[in-house]
Amino acid sequence: MAIERALISVYDKTGVAEFARELDSLGIEIVSTGGTARLLRDAGISVRDVSDLTGWPEMLGGRVKTLHPKVHGGILFQRAKADDRKQATEHSIVPIDLVVVNLYPFSATAAKPGVTSEELIENIDIGGPAMVRSAAKNFQSVGVVTDPADYAAIVAELRENRELSLQTRLALARKAYARTARYDGEIATELERLAANGSVTIGAREKLPERIHIDLERRQPMRYGENPHQAAALYVPAGRPPAGFAGAKQLQGKELSYNNLVDLDAAWALVSEFKRPAVAIIKHNNPCGAAEQDSLREAYVKALACDPISAYGGVLAFNQPIDAPAAEEVAKLFVECIAAPGYESAALAHFAAKKNLRLIEMPRAASCEELVVKQIAGAMLVQQPDRHELTEAEVSVASKRAPTEAERRALLFAWKVAKHVKSNAIVFAREGQTVGVGAGQMSRVDSVKIAVMKAATAGLSLEGSVFASDAFFPFPDSIEEAGKAGATAVIQPGGSVRDADSIAAADKLGMAMLLTGVRHFRH
């Protein structure tokens, strides 16, 4: 069925003049509204006003312009049904074969500082979604275009066939309904900010809204999930600029797996804590080494020294572009994946021989502010991400002895790393270097013992080291075990009913203790 008439009414006018010119060159009549019609006329394109089609002017400040039977009848009537064709003729309804619509920028308006309730409400599009839904419902006869990125493909198909295939129209309809669903979800969430007490006022967003509308689109299929019998794919938030791993580029190597991405995310989150050159080595979602030094090479060497056995086959992240000296060292180890904000050409040359090594270049944009969602049987748990940064005002000395400046720096480093270790988490460190990590144990003292054992296996002395605990000590045994291993200072949240016992144990060992008042459980 050849396309004879297109209705174009868009807020985002990117590429619309060029698109309309192509339609015009194919002899397709263009009907348009308001600002879109003016833009097209200014571009020298012949346009028929929608008011000419309907016999009614735009009214109510533009709220009503396409909500008319001659618009929706032209979109919705079923061309294959004789009765629909008869009614269309009786009521002078002409067919609209292509609907090109994108919507008022509601989310962008809602995000503006100082936005008023009136601005928010007036940026709720009514006519646009109505036309999109009508066209999408009648996809057997009508094409609907909601994304300027589709213009080129539409033009190419029309040039070749003068019509859009049923397959194309169905794909466009699916995309259109996904767009209006997302749009309505955005509106429902933002309207929670409105209060109606005699007048309508707008307030701040809730940290956790009453309803969460999650719209994801499949970006990349995975070979499988955590295990070969599980299907998996990478999904990204629809309608948003790519961010985080959705905006990353893979420069070389095999296809990323589900487990690769989980570990890469953990590694990237950890190195993003640091400003100086830093490296994190992750294995099974836990750090087996991390360091912050004056150069990436030095940071990598020190991170690797913490647990070189576990680092084999691990995932690495660097918080600065990788230079040749760092790459030369990394190339000596079997590594699955590396994430970094960039790679010097000399570094890429060092990695080139490792064809299977996956190199990921991360975007430099700030981290995503998504909520953390976890599925449990029959429900979803939602929380804010743990992005707490410890301030000096939160830290207090609980022991008789205050830590030295060197100990304090090492303690704050260990605290940042402990935040990224599965609970129960224990991290032994020197300044800018982990020297023992105990993760994910049911007993905190067992995590201490594992960290001590890991350090011994790596040939690292814990004499004069410090350690961090992600949560309070229920008993003094962890302090005693760490002191026996040579630790001289500890940082922990505090808050146990037995805090006095742990503090007394630290004092007895001459150990300095800092309390943060903040817990970093990671389950």
Image: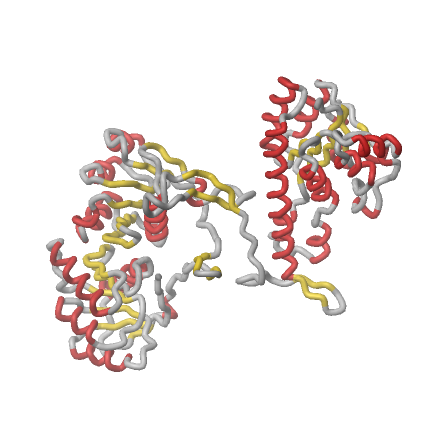
Q: Where is residue 445 shown, x and y percent of the image?
A: 21, 70
Q: Is residue 38 visible?
A: no
Quadrant in which the N terminus appears: top right
Q: Where is residue 9 shown, x and y percent of the image?
A: 72, 36
Residue 73, above or below 110: above
Q: Residue at x 35, y 61 (%)?
A: 523
Q: Is residue 341 visible?
A: yes
Q: Residue at x 27, y 67 (%)?
A: 469
Q: How is the image coloured?
A: secondary structure
Q: Residue 38, located in which quarter of the rendered image?
A: top right
Q: Residue furthest front?
A: 82
In front: 381, or 397? Answer: 381
Q: Where is residue 90 shown, x and y percent of the image?
A: 89, 32
In front: 441, or 48? Answer: 441
Q: Residue at x 70, y 63 (%)?
A: 201
**How many marks overall?**
0
Q: Residue at x 73, y 29 (%)?
A: 97
Side of 105 where 239 appears, left or right: left
Residue 394, above or below 124: below
Residue 277, above or below 499: above
Side of 449 where 32 appears, left or right: right
In front: 334, or 175? Answer: 175
Q: Residue 496, located in which quarter of the rendered image?
A: bottom left
Q: Where is residue 256 shown, x and y percent of the image?
A: 35, 39
